[in-house]
Image (cartoon, helix red, strand yellow):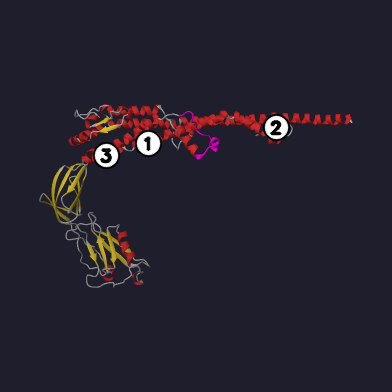
Amino acid sequence: MINNNMRMTGFASGMDINQMVKDLMQAERLPLQKMEQDQLWLTQRRDAYREVNTKLLEFDNKFLDMRMSSTYTSKTASSSSDAISVTASNQATDGNYSFEVTQLASAATRYSGVDGTAFGQGYDADQALAAEYVGEEVSFAYHDQSPDSPKTVSFTIQDGESLNDVLGRISEESGGAVRAFYDQNSDRVFMERTETGDFNQGGLEFEGLNAFFTDTLNISADEQGGKDAEFTYNDIAMTSHSNNYQFNGMNLTFNSTGSANVSVSHDVDGSVDKIKEFVEQYNELIDFMNEKVGEERHRDYPPLTEDQRKDMSEREIELWEERSKSGELRNDGILRSALSGMRSAWYESVDNPNGDLSRMMDVGITTTSNWRQGGKLEIDETKLREKLQENPSAVHRLFSNSDEGNSRGILNRVEDVVESTRDRIRDRAGTATQTEHQYTMGRELKNMAERMANFERRMQQTEQRYWDQFTAMEKAMQKYNEQASFMMQNFGGGMQ
């Protein structure tokens, strides 16, 4: 610490000691300013690396879709009629299929008011039930596909519960297998299975309906039984408990009765679109990385320190930083290695057991003829469609065979380069969650901070030395002035 109490600021000499020390220290601190700028430049380069790693991670996530066989072998399906909706999985076989729906599946249903009784228009289903119903048991049973069918549900009515509360509990206690609700417009309570189909020969019955249902809710002992969907495939009769049916890799939804011709084919358009999207994202990555390694470095525009910013306008700072941040990764070895590695991966051949589709050019994908574009890809869409139509599995193998060695798919090799590059950047520039000692540039920044702190301590000592020297000078001059004044007084007295 500098001892301010011992400072003498020019009373004896008449000099501006404060300004003289300030000017001397400004010259002494020039090396510190250079260290601050070096520290800021290293921080900017670290952040530039991390930006690249973020871009690489975003692109790396795109490989998942490209590794899946569905990208190359997906199917599309269409129906000639609104009676049936259809989608197709990859397992569906190409071709035409003929269906006719003669009956839709329905759920078993009971409702109140069959005998003409009613709650009465304006009935408040949210009003608490009368005290006579508190403690009354609500019990019913329903059928499903389980061998333990029928399943019994029972609970007791609680004090303060309304009709809507009780009907809601029917759904809750049955796990959603049965739902019940009051429709004010028709003045009826409905109770029905949420699952369609005929599960028990002759209709689905709510067995064990007790007095609460028959006397209080006026629900009839008769019901509308659940029905199976009935349809034919090529005149062969078939049934389904629901209006959804899985057939040879197709998902059929029965919307109404009627006939429909269903067509299944390879979704070449979908495959081409996904490959084109991937190539576009790859080209964007190549543009980004090429821009980074080719940016001009403006060495005359080092990063601005806080002291330098104070003397500049916002516009001046903006223009300066635009040049200062240019070229942070110019000719960077990691990025150049990545660009070279990815470009080579696209050119390499893949051992294919069928003897064809061993190179990307076989499916119409090549690097552009303009070498200035740095290895960007272009697609011959006609050729790509042709190969996807002929043998989508071979295209998938060429792109994404997970084997090692010469059989490894092209995209797997590109991904290997991407992941290796990300590892190298992490080792050098770290991540936001790492401490400085865990990566190379962090350790460099830590060492620079320590050197700057040591330099700052030396500057404090230097400043104290200047003050000590000027203070000693001031004391000497003050003593001289006192002696001269004394002599002048004595000499002047002798003259009189």
Q: Position of residue 336 (x, y in %)?
A: 37, 27
Write down the residue under mark 3. Answer: 274
Please state if 467 lies on the left or on the right of 63 as rendered.
Answer: right
Secondary-structure class at tag 3: helix
Q: For the magenta stretch, what is the residue range?
A: 298-314
Secondary-structure class at tag 2: loop
Secondary-structure class at tag 1: helix
Q: Position of residue 441 (x, y in %)?
A: 47, 30
Q: Which mark is residue 15?
A: 2
Tell me the amino acid under the disc marked 1. Answer: Lys
Q: Residue at x 49, y 37 (%)?
A: 317
Gap between marks 1 and 3 measured at Cα: 19 Å
Q: Few, some or many C-alpha atoms within 10 Å of disc 3 (few <14, some 14-19, many ≥20)? A: some
Q: Residue at x 51, y 30 (%)?
A: 38
Q: Which mark is residue 55?
A: 1
Tell me the amino acid under the disc marked 2. Answer: Met
Gap between marks 1 and 2 measured at Cα: 60 Å
Q: Is residue 57 magenta?
A: no
Label located before the other in sequence (1 or 2): 2
Q: Position of residue 369 (x, y in %)?
A: 28, 28
**Snapshot quadrant of residue 111:** bottom left
Q: Is residue 461 above or below residue 315?
A: above
Which secondary structure class fits the magenta region best? loop
Q: Position of residue 239 (x, y in %)?
A: 16, 53
Please state if 196 lies on the left or on the right of 471 as rendered.
Answer: left
Q: Residue at x 83, y 31 (%)?
A: 486
Please state if 81 lies on the left or on the right of 112 as rendered.
Answer: left
Q: Are marks 1 and 3 in contact (CB under 8 Å)?
A: no
Label located before the other in sequence (1 or 3): 1
